[in-house]
Amino acid sequence: MLAAMSVVPMLDVLAKLLSESYSSIQISWARFVFNALWLLPILHFRGLKWWTLPPQPLTHVLRSLMLTGATVLFFIAIKTNPIPNALTLLFVSPLVVAMLAPTLLGEKFDLYIGVGVVVGFAGVVVVLQPDTEQFQPSLLYALGSGFCYALYIIATRKLSHSGPPLLTLFYTALGGAFVLSFMVAPSWATPSHDALIMMAAMGLVAALAHFLLIKAFEHASASELSPFNYFEIVVAILLSYIVFDFLPTIEAVMGLAVIASSGLFVSWRAMKNSNKAQLREVDVERL
């Protein structure tokens, strides 16, 4: 999990470097196309039939659309904003999942979770600073990315037992490449040799990161691994300093601490409620 969270920010750094010459749509298109291409030999090696129609195809389509939307919006945000600032707002996704889970997943939403969500969005206000001259409206794209990513997480939960994770990942990449292929033409710019290498590297990084995540979930539960998600911001800050000479402000760090803390609390509370529900089901079965 730590290795995966160390790899993911490299994708964002490559996207931000490419954004100096190419549109966010084209960069997103390249991310999904090369991701799918890198996954093909792995699927072949494992004997997975990627050309067959998956179960729950509409949920697969929704999952792919939400990750595509999250990617495009995030790449738009980091074009003019530091990666750590945008990534902090992306971390609202666990809070959004907590709000939508009762309706879409049938999970419990109690007072403690509600307080955690409110505190988390207070952290968003601290990061955005909407009443100051430092407010950057383009950061709202990162917030929108967080909402899309939350729906992606919910769709992923619904598909958690529908097939091999690598195959699900391939369908998602293929869907993103397909949708963006219809949108990329107006802003298309022929990539240079160096840009093409960077785009291919983006796809490789995405495939590697998700492969590491899959391996992590083979050995531990989601609740055990969720705290390590926030290691991504540590690597993102480090890379942003090395590549872009950027360090976050005190306000950004404070906002990150509030969002991360509330996200961890909400995840812990949701897990506790889930465990209680499972224990009740066991008791009923015994009766």
Image (spheres, rainbow, N blue to C red):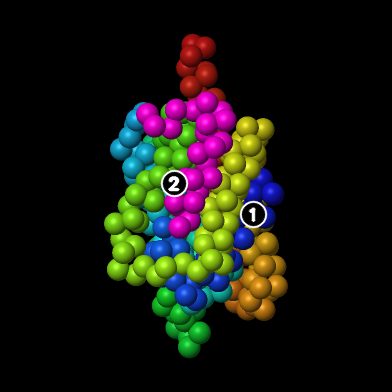
The residue that disc 1 covers is 7
Q: Secondary structure at mark 2?
A: helix
Q: Which residues are magenta?
A: 30-52
Task: Check the image and report above or below for 252 versus 171.
Answer: below
- Check disc 1 and report its element: helix, strand or loop: helix
Residue at point 52% right, 18% down? 283
Quick check: 159 left or right of 45?
A: left
Looking at the rendered structure, the kind of residue marked 2 is: Ala
Left or right: residue 56 versus residue 47 is left
Q: Position of residue 48 (x, y in %)?
A: 49, 28
**N-term-proximal mark, 1 vs 2:** 1
Quarter-of-image position of residue 187: bottom left
For the residue marked with disc 1, what is the amino acid?
Val
Height in image: 175 above or below 232? above
Q: Which residue is at the front of the view, 251 or 188?
A: 188
CA neighbours of label 1 inside 10 A, class few (<14), some (14 to 19), many (20+): many
Residue 201 visible from this viewpoint: yes
Which residue: 44% across, 28% down? Answer: 49
Q: Which residue is mark 2?
A: 173
Q: Main secondary structure of the magenta part?
A: helix
Query: Which of the two residues, 252 or 203, is positioned nearer the viewer here?
Result: 203
Quadrant for the N terminus in the image: top right
Do we see residue 147 in this rendering? no
Q: CA distance from mark 1 to mark 2?
A: 18 Å
User: How far across and down, in percent of the image, does residue 238 sit?
Assistant: 70, 68
Position of residue 166 relative to residue 228, above or below, is above
Give the percent coordinates (x, y) of residue 135: 47, 81
